[in-house]
Image: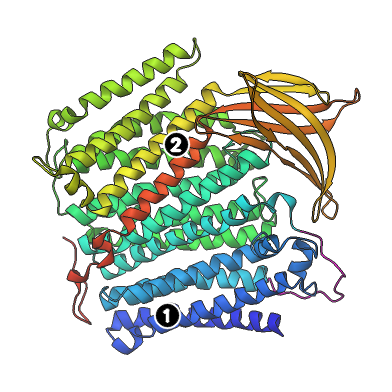
Amino acid sequence: MIIEFGHFALILAFLVACVQAIVPLVGAHRRWPGWMAVAAPAANVQFLLTAASFAALTYAFVMSDFSVRLVTINSHTDKPLLYKITGVWGNHEGSMLLWVLIVTLFGAFAAWFGGNLPPTLRARVLSVQAMVGVAFFAFILFTSNPFLRMQVPPFDGQDLNPLLQDPGLAFHPPFLYLGYVGLSMTFSFAVAALIEGRVDAAWGRWVRPYTLAAWIFLTIGIGLGSWWAYYELGWGGFWFWDPVENASFMPWLIAAALLHSAIVVEKRESMKSWTILLAIIAFGFSMIGAFITRSGVLTSVHAFATDPERGMFLLMITAVFMLGGLTLFAARANVLQAKGVFSVVSRESFLVANNVLLAVSAFVVFVGTIWPLVSEMLFDRKLSVGAPFFNMAFTPFMVALGLLLPVGAMLPWKRGSLGKAIRPLRLVFVLSVAIGVLAWAMQTGRSGLGPVGLFLAAWLVSGAAVDLWSRTGRGENRLGRLARLPRADWGKAVAHAGFGITIAGVAAMMAWETEDIRVVQEGEAFELSGFTLVLEDVQEVQGPNYVSTMGQVSLSRNGTEIATLYPEKRFYPVARMPTTEAALDIGFWRDVYVVIGDPQSNGGWAVRTYYKPLANWIWGGSILMALGGALSLTDRRYRIAAGARKTPAVSGGVPAE
């Protein structure tokens, strides 16, 4: 009964979304307050119905209801409760239900906190958001119904993919979806503004919190996915330029550009056309990500489905929204004239450069990701675009971005002096160069990647500190004024510093990590980068739904024992699939990473070990970037939600000339 209720609630939510997509839009066009007023309650009802449907599917997984086909395929009685719950979205159908739940959640947020929006704009935003919901409700109901029943329910299920039975990946998809779908709100605001014929400073202030929230969630989701890949896959890497990794990285880059361009709209009413275009493209990349993970056109360890028919449905959804948005953008370009004028040397100019670097880097990643498919379709040639291409093509843009950020943050709006902006940064530049030179001298003739990365990290972190300090003015009590700075200033500094710390971690790992692969007998000792490791024992361990070959490895340095590590190789009998569980000794300056492999004919074991310098700086920097975004999101000007910009209840749109 609960399953049928969940299915029925999903159908009702689809019908409510259809009403919400049409009635408020007509009401806004006709200036009918009653029709516009339908938007908010419809958004609330749509969210509640979708939440009820999602709760029903979660109940089926928790209770191991194997009469539901999805539960049978993706769950098992012996599976721990956490993975029964996360199994709800650890598959194609459930993940799409989570996707549409978040679509309705963001629509409900706009209804709850959009009281300061002009009524016509609010109605149009909620209507466009409902159109996104209609498309994905239709996709679920007609191609990916999660509530299908089994004619003959089995006694037990087939288990969830063992790679997904991990805390890191359990929470990775929800955060990514919050980011992906959060960008649907920026799309809705952009399309609504184009219909309204109004893009001004108030619009920039309204759209930026949603963009910021989406970027924060994407940052957390990408960080969790990178961390999972690092310790779970056993390859010792944090990023593989996998198509699905790229599918989340591209909207992150575009969202970062959108954040910075929206500041210019808010502060100076410039870059309107570019900001609207980025808002459309950002959501387009999110839908491209859904297509890549579910169409089967590109293979990935992260892919949810490989059904070409579903892929075509998603491709049509993407085409409709992107072509529709871009056509409307072209038709309404006349209302996007900029007001603010700025010189070549100004914060606006540096934000333009920031946007160009981020957008071009996203395009490079897109080309590298999609080119194998294009090559096979058009030229009948199978190509593989791997890490060497991405590293060479992408890295220069990030280096240039890192160099620009501290300088751009110090420049004033409209017109500035480059010499005056650089003057406070001279000492930190010298310090950063010294750190890079020291790293070069200590690394004994390796590549320049590590020194350049440490130079950029020091430059970004110290530049962010100087930027904050410069905002305290002169005289006494500067520390007191520092504590009272707006949260947006603190957020910008923390995020830029986090970016620098992540760069340091990436550069150090790529330049200075060491790897050792050997056959080790029980009781045998071996060396790794000044550490001594001893394989003390290997034994079979029974887990809740797996059998583990667990090694016991002691780690010491200079005769002092540091830790005992327990690497595992697990086998899941139901899924008939092995997984690797690396053991790590985590430190501030380095990780020691141990993986145990298969037994060898001579009685030893294959053991792979890594020394990973500054490994945790990668995820520490990601946390700081997300924290910086959260600080900015709680800034006062977003909490008051542009209240000063309220307009009369049924006023017409004012062109932005």
Q: Earlier in the sequence, mark 2 or mark 1?
A: 1
Is 129 positioned to the left or the right of 265 in the image? right
Dot 1 surroundings within 10 Å: few (below 14), some, or many (20 or more)? Answer: some
Dot in front, 2 or 1: 2
Q: Does the image show residue 349?
A: no
Q: For mark 2, give the secondary structure.
A: helix
474 lies above or below 389: below
- Does the magenta portion include 147? yes
284 lies above or below 415: below
Magenta-drawn stretch, dominant element (helix, strand or loop): loop
Q: For mark 1, give the secondary structure.
A: helix
Is 305 positioned to the left or the right of 318 in the image? right
The magenta-colored residue range is 146-159
Circle 2/circle 1 CB separation < 8 Å: no
Question: Is residue 555 or residue 217 the one in the foreground?
Answer: 555
In three-dimensional space, the C-alpha distance between marks 2 and 1, rounded to whole angstroms, equals 45 Å
Task: Quickly name the residue at label 1.
Answer: 22
